[in-house]
Image: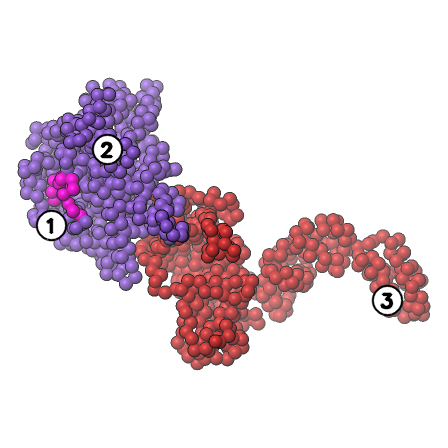
Chain colours: A red, B purple
Amino acid sequence: MSADILSFEEAMENFDPVLGFEVHVELNTKTKMFDAAPNAFGDQPNTNTTPVSLGLPGVLPVVNKKAVESAVRLGLALNCSIAPVSHFARKNYFYPDTPKNFQTSQYDEPIAFDGEITVELEDGTPFTIEIERAHMEEDAGKLTHKGGATGRIQGAEFSLVDYNRAGVPLIEIVTKPIVGAGDRAPELARVYVAAIREIVKNLGISDARMERGNVRCDANVSLMPKGSTTFGTRSETKNVNSLRAVERAVRYEIQRHAAVLTAGDAIVQETRHWHEDTRSTTSGRPKSDADDYRYFPEPDLVPVVPDPEWVEQLRAELPEPPSERRKKLKAEWGYSDQEFRDVVNAGVLDEIEATIAAGATAGAARKWWMGEIARLANVRGTEIAELGVTPEHVVEIESLIGAKTINDKIAKQVIGHIADGEGSPAQVVEARSLAVVSDDGVLLTAIDDAMAQMPDVVAKVQAGKVQAVGALIGPVMKATKGQADAGRVRELILEKLGIN
Amino acid sequence: MTQNIIELSAAELAQKLAEREVTSVQAVEAHLERIAATDGRPVEADNPYAGKTGLNAFLHVNTEEALSVAAEVDAARESGEDLPELAGVPIAVKDLIVTKGQPTTAASKMLEGWMSPYDGTVTQRLRAARMPMLGKTNLDEFAMGSTTEHSAYGVTRNPWDLTRIPGGSGGGSAAAVTAFQAPLALGTDTGGSIRQPAAVTGSVGVKPTYGSVSRYGVIAMASSLDQVGPCSRTVLDAALLHEVVGGHDPQDSTSLTDPATGFASAARAGAAEGGLKGLRVGVVKELTGEGFQAGVEQRFREAVDLLRSAGAEVVEVETPNFRYALGAYYLIMSSEVSSNLAKYDGVRFGRRTLPTDGNLTIERVMGATRAAGFGAEVKRRTILGTYALSAGYYDAYYGSAQKVRTLVQRDFNAAFEKCDVLISPTAPTTAFPIGSVDEHADPMQMYLNDVATIPTNLAGVPAISLPAGLAPEDGLPVGVQFMAPAREDARLYCAGAGLEALLTQANGGPIWKDLPDVVTAVNNLPGTTSAVATEGAAK
């Protein structure tokens, strides 16, 4: 028996990873891909449906023009060619989350193909990823398995199905095999998915919230022995739904493949599931020729033939690409290369931009997002953007500091309470009585106590060693639970001792 | 009075309604009475699958709603409201078209008791035209068949001879208009399901240009072939109904954008003196001769002679690829069937059958539901289509069939360079006896019924079938079919109405002057007399 996984370093000594990604992007169109049912998240189950999205007898699909527009724009942003004619096909399989028991999807004739994007690794190294295709399709409904111990289908007593998501427009972006990433493969996986998320957000075509499944990544991993150019057998890890998870899942699969191959065994071509709790993957169903989806052209739809002039107009109206935007922002904000890369890698570019737009200085915005907020997100194991602290909160904190209502130390506490859902900074300060003690009387009492306890220090200061005053400030701050303004305390002590 | 009303064509009835000689309520009542007198009663009180003792053309009779719509139309007319031309004229609807307020079964156990929560586009248009719906007509299950023997609710009988099939799949609609149960009916035609029943019942049936009539709300059999169309006793009536239900529908992506108009005026022009002069008619060489019954050929030739004598230019055209059409059709149709019928799985609507033993996994419930809900012909075509689309077979079967489809379209294009319309017999034979074709042993024998109708479905072009008289050897109706280029449906109505006028003149009246007394025939059916006689006496 071999170990389940090899260490990443060992794996890298002997193998080169090959990656491939299928990223599904849910569009934020008002209605679904093929009917007028609302495309909305979080509503009562089975309320966002029409006879069409329920697949009732006699219904017919009609393509959502806005979804086609989104697909063309995304295709252009990925530097793809836009097909003058593309078709929909039916992917046939029986499963209760698919009302028609087939998924309408583009198969051999996608709307966009042959593109590429260049992403930046953490240290700024560019890496170009080739895009095979981007095609339109519809999402399936959502199954909830009840009665089992794990919430999985195995052992469940019954399953509930919600068709609100059935028919929601998706664009699937498929890369060509990615070689040459070496030991940076896991990192590349993360920055690639982050780049796609950034692009669709920038285009405004998706809410791009990974925790809601707006952006879902299937990661394909295979290994080839170092020096070989023949691809190995791949595994496909499904629905890896956060940036960290993408990186970890790829790393884990590389280690697992390496262990299997090193032991002389063969990789099974299969679908695998990522488990965030155990940070490992388990086998799903084997993927083989037994999966026969019997694709054929969708006879209820006519070909998609985008007017070339319209495509050119969309191209001309594309927003500035994220990389251009980054260059511009870096110059505006005056961050160093390293500072700016850190901001990008932390995924808080949008937050900082919004914070500055709301009135904060570039330095202050960076200080908070990359400081306490990032630290807190890390401690709590969540994405910074999901912490619940907004750019407006940061601006408000800055102004409270400016008004000397709070100090930096209190501000950090306030951020923690905001993340706990206790409201805006002002509300937190009010509710928790965190305002700086500005009543000189209270301070003077504490100063008197401190001086009484430390007459030697008082003597030193009076003898001209003004810097010794710090030893008196400490106990005063302690006595006021940090809610005093240290500068004011110093002033008061010196005043009291007749030193100006 | 009753007798008079039901014998009126839709155009005549519309005229009398407009002139207030007749009310819509009277018209609906007369047809409901006729249905009661000819359709029979359930053979077994608690078993809908045993069918009815008479024609069994209707799966559901919509008495209450039809009468209330009729009363509303009458009231509107009384108050001087402007009404659509066919307002108040009753109509029957093939039970493949969804209707709010009435069951829709597709003649399948799978949808037994299912009520659609929405109306199909054609249903909406009938409502907008204020035409009372008499009910839903019988068909082969999910429109798969040429006899109605594959209905889960019993076979429909041919009004000309109750021991014979009425054609299929739309045997119910054809039998209903033939037996004066309704002046008009809607059918659907995937490979001849409107025209072949029209031919063997001596009625008129039109398959419009693909995309001419919306398919939204029509239960799909084969999406790229299905088309809704009119069933009637006269060509003009079919034209009037086509104008009501046709036209663009944004809910059907394959719907043509041109409006459907000018059909009735084309029919009137064709029927007028000299209306066929100069019309170039192409006789399709491949659709005559071997396999066609002698009496069918004879009536067909006579019809062609009549056209020639009326000033039409008759030429012969060759369509060499038609010989592959039947094979291509059965591959494309069954492939689409296998996918279109996948939704019937017991999960969301319709029948759900639980397996009698073992675990209730979703796969097993779907399997048990489909095993119990579908009949043999549906299963055969589903299996055939699943096979044809399978990896490794797709190119050889579905791919080749699509190529044939293109070749058939080219044959039509070439033929239409030489002539305005094509003509052929609609079906190779007259109506055959119920139960005479053992399609389990040899399904091809049944499929061959559609040899002349299928090419138009493959090419998407329109066609009309109209009666050409009775075959000398069996006294049963023979149909002839005109075919026209896509979007030239008006030519069909022109040529059809012209030939209809010539035949009526030559035969001393319409074909139904020779129709046997259906009420008597139904009452004389062995073993069914008492039930129907009781019904009759009650009226």
1 and 2 marks on the same chain:
yes
Left or right: A331, with B160 as reference point: right
In front: mark 3 or mark 2? 2
Chain designation of label 1: B
* Image quarter hosting the C terminus of chain B: top left
Residue positioned 68% across, 50% down in the render: A422
Q: B517 or A322: nearer the eye?
A: B517
3 and 2 marks on the same chain:
no
> Picture coordinates of residue B336 (x, y %)?
28, 51
Say which residue label 1 marks: B286
- Residue farthest toward the front in the current orientation of the protein: B357
Is residue A429 shown above or below A324?
above
3 and 1 marks on the same chain:
no
- Check disc 1 and give the amino acid type: Glu
- Disc 2 residue crowd, few under 14, some 14–19, many 20+, Cα 10 Å: some
- Check disc 3 and give the amino acid type: Ala
Residue positioned 37% across, 57% down in the render: A106
- The residue range painted magenta reads B424-439
Give the spatial CA distance, label 3 vs label 1.
112 Å
Numbered disc 1: secondary structure: helix
Left or right: A465, with B392 as reference point: right
Residue positioned 25% across, 26% down in the render: B32
Discs 3, 1 touching: Cβ within 8 Å: no
Q: B158 or A184: nearer the eye?
A: B158
Q: B327 or B240: nearer the eye?
A: B327
Say which residue label 3 marks: A471
Say which residue label 2 marks: B43
- Check disc 2 and give the amino acid type: Val
